Image (cartoon, helix red, strand yellow):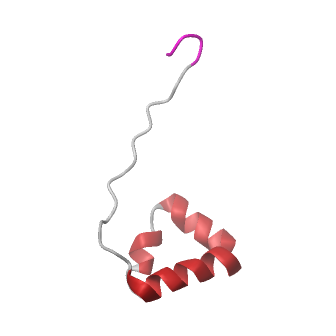
């Protein structure tokens, strides 16, 4: 609690630190522009980088 507000203690999970490469970056841009729901779902689930690493 900070003053009159409750502030949650949020901790991000450790993600993979491998770069995704050129084709992974291009596929990420494609997902952002044309498959927004899939991109957002994978981003929230934490599976986006693992998926993009295959490209």
Q: Residue 40 sits in which quadrant?
A: bottom right
Is 5 positioned to the left or the right of 36 in the image?
Answer: left
Q: Which percent across, then down, holds residue 21? A: 38, 83
Residue 30 belongs to magenta span: no
Q: Residue 4 sits in which quadrant?
A: top right
Q: Say above or below: 52 vs 55.
A: above
Q: Say above or below: 4 vs 24.
A: above
Residue 4 belongs to magenta span: yes
**Boundaries of the magenta span:** 1-5
Is 18 positioned to the left or the right of 21 in the image?
Answer: left
Q: Say above or below: 7 vs 14.
A: above
Q: Which residue is drawn at 44% across and 31% down?
A: 9
Q: Single out the residue that lies furthest toward the front.
A: 22
Q: In which quarter of the image is the C terminus?
A: bottom left
User: Total of numbered circles in the picture?
Assistant: 0
The residue lying toward the viewer, choosing from 19 and 7, is 19
Q: Residue at x 42, y 71 (%)?
A: 49
The chief SS type of the magenta part is loop
Is 15 positioned to the left or the right of 5 in the image?
Answer: left
Q: Residue at x 32, y 54 (%)?
A: 14
Q: Which percent across, then down, holds residue 51? A: 44, 78
Q: Residue at x 53, y 67 (%)?
A: 42
Q: Single out the residue that lies furthest toward the top.
A: 3
Is 16 positioned to the left or the right of 32 in the image?
Answer: left
Q: Which percent across, then down, holds residue 24? A: 45, 83
């Amino acid at each position: 609690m900070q003053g009159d507000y409750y502030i949650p203690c949020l901790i991000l999970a450790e993600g993979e630190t491998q770069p995704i490469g050129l084709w992974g970056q291009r596929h990420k841009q494609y997902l952002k522009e044309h498959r927004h729901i899939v991109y957002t779902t994978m981003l929230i689930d934490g599976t986006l980088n693992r998926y993009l690493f295959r490209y």
